[in-house]
Image: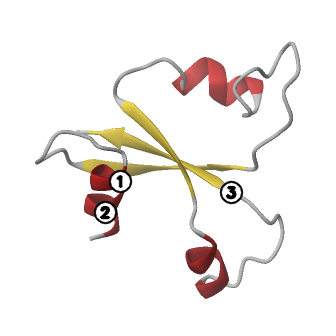
Amino acid sequence: MFCAQVARECKLPEGTVLEFTGELFQPIPWTVTTKKGMPAALEKKYHGKEEYTFINVPPVFMFQAKIFSPPRLCAIYKRK
């Protein structure tokens, strides 16, 4: 259900199936080596590849999961 909502909010084509990659990261400030706001290793592995979608984890989900720190998280989903 949540994956379908993510696909809809990301304006992906209808019927797109997403799968959580298991990767969460805290957004980081821009630097010369981290231009996309994610750790360099994740940027190299996932950014710029059509089959991956990045989302900000909604605060309500973090609260329900009792995650209070860090205050923001991003998740990486793979398009099937």
Which residue is drawn at the image coordinates 63% and 73% (left, top)? 59
Instruction: Give how far across and how far down residue 53 sits, in percent.
Output: 43, 38
Which residue is drawn at the image coordinates 76% and 50% (left, top)? 26
Rendering quarter of residue 29: top right
- Kindly check if marks 1 and 2 are in contact, taking CB atoms under 8 A apart as contact: yes
Instruction: Give how far across and how far down residue 33 sits, in percent.
Output: 83, 15
Q: Quadrant of the C terminus?
A: top left
Dot 1: what SS? helix
- Mark 1–mark 2 Cα distance, whole angstroms, equals 6 Å
Q: Is residue 73 above or below residue 2?
A: above
Q: Nearer the viewer, mark 2 or mark 3?
A: 2
Instruction: Give how far across and how far down residue 47 sits, in percent.
Output: 55, 23
Instruction: Give how far across and how far down residue 68 sits, in percent.
Output: 79, 77
- Mark 1–mark 3 Cα distance, whole angstroms, equals 17 Å
According to the picture, the residue beneath numbered tag 2 turns out to be 5
Residue 73 is tagged as: 3
Q: Nearer the viewer, mark 1 or mark 2?
A: 1
Which residue is drawn at the image coordinates 72% and 34% (left, top)? 38
What is the number of callouts on the image?
3
Q: Is residue 17 above or below residue 71?
A: above
Dot 3: what SS? loop
Residue 29 placement, left or right of 66:
right
For the residue marked with disc 3, what is the amino acid? Answer: Leu
- Kindly check if marks 1 and 3 are in contact, taking CB atoms under 8 A apart as contact: no
For the residue marked with disc 1, what is the amino acid? Answer: Glu
According to the picture, the residue beneath numbered tag 1 turns out to be 9
Residue 73 placement, left or right of 29:
left
How many residues crowd mark 1 within 10 Å: few (<14), some (14–19), many (20+)?
A: few
How many residues crowd mark 2 within 10 Å: few (<14), some (14–19), many (20+)?
A: few
Give whichever of discs 1 and 3 has the lower sequence position. Answer: 1
